[in-house]
Image (spheres, rainbow, N blue to C red):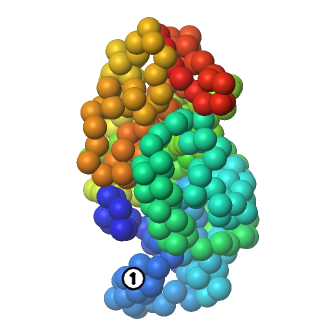
Amino acid sequence: MPVTLGVVNVYLIPSDDGLLLIDTGTSDDGAFHVLTQKLSALGHTVADIRRVLVTHYHPDHCGLAMRLQQAGAHIWMSRKDADVLVEYFANPQADVDRAQFFGRHPMPQKLSQRIGTMARLLRDLHAEFVPDALFDDGDMLGWGGISLEVVDTPGHTPGHVAFVSREHRVLFVGDHLLADQVAMLSAQDISPDTDALTQMFASLALMDRFVGFSGAAGHGPLIEDVAMRAQQTAGFHRARLQKVCDALLDEPQTALALSVRAFGEKRSAYSQWLSMTSAVSLLEYLHINQSAQRLTASDGSYLYRR
Ligand SMILES: [Zn+2]
């Protein structure tokens, strides 16, 4: 990954009906090379991958889907994130202005230009594909002795899912939970009646069902206990929420100004973008729960006050 996350984990599961891969890595040649090398060390080629399950639509998780599909694999993903992808590939211009989201949240032109550049970079790590099959919450997927249950875990993306193996007491959690960090909240699904943090809190609470299950995450080491890690993650979000709440003033402020008040000035445009995206998610949560007022300026942009 060219930006902060470094290494992406993908999971290969042998079955009596060919190989199953959970997530893919980015669409670039480097990632494809690593994947083919690792497969060959196990005595396989990409053509042995019969199915690919995708946890969410981000490029590091399904960027290689198209190439694997061309090599013969069937790609499965959630209906909701498949819809997000259709929209994403239909609107390359959205990288430049991020109109649905940032059009509402004023920022200096220099910052928005750098975010646009970064968004285009991320787009280069993706490759358009049409999934062969879609799944929904609660679906049981099974092939050649493997059985995985789909659990919707929205928050990081609108259609993020985890795959549960009850037999092996493990969840493939994508970016829903990470052992040593907390993935960003979705910037995709902010609307008057839903917000990413409400979804995330609900998805984290679901993990109480899986006490003692380990978590195979999209980045970083194995999670020992998903229920415990979910509680820690909820605590992290509550602490950030408090910071944003404390940053609110009587005077209306932009999300950018409030993100700086709450989390400090960031060195890189990418970090500033993450910080502001996070602040917007938290502000929308506060707004929906009537702990912040959201005002619409004459140019349509949003300002927040206590
Ligand atoms: Zn992700």
Q: Residue at x 52, y 36 (%)?
A: 106
Q: Residue at x 31, y 64 (%)?
A: 6
Question: Where is residue 272, by image quadrant?
Answer: top left
Q: Residue at x 27, y 33 (%)?
A: 264
Quadrant of the frame with the N terminus: bottom left
Q: Which residue is mark 1?
A: 30
Badge 1 element: helix
Would residue 123 be visible to someone looking at this image?
A: yes
Horizontal side, residue 189 vs residue 252: left or right: right
Q: Residues within 10 Å of mark 1 (few under 14, many from 20)?
A: few
Horizontal side, residue 136 vs residue 216: left or right: right
Amino acid type at mark 1: Gly
Vertical relation: 64 (above or below) 142: below
Vertical relation: 239 (above or below) 135: above
Would residue 203 be visible to someone looking at this image?
A: no
Q: How many marks?
A: 1
Q: Residue at x 43, y 57 (%)?
A: 114
Residue 209, given in percent of the width and then of the height, sits at 48, 33
Front in this rendered view, residue 165 or 1: 1
Front in this rendered view, residue 293 or 170: 293
Question: Where is residue 101, by image quadrant?
Answer: top right
Front in this rendered view, residue 302 or 108: 108
Residue 263, given in percent of the width and then of the height, sits at 30, 31
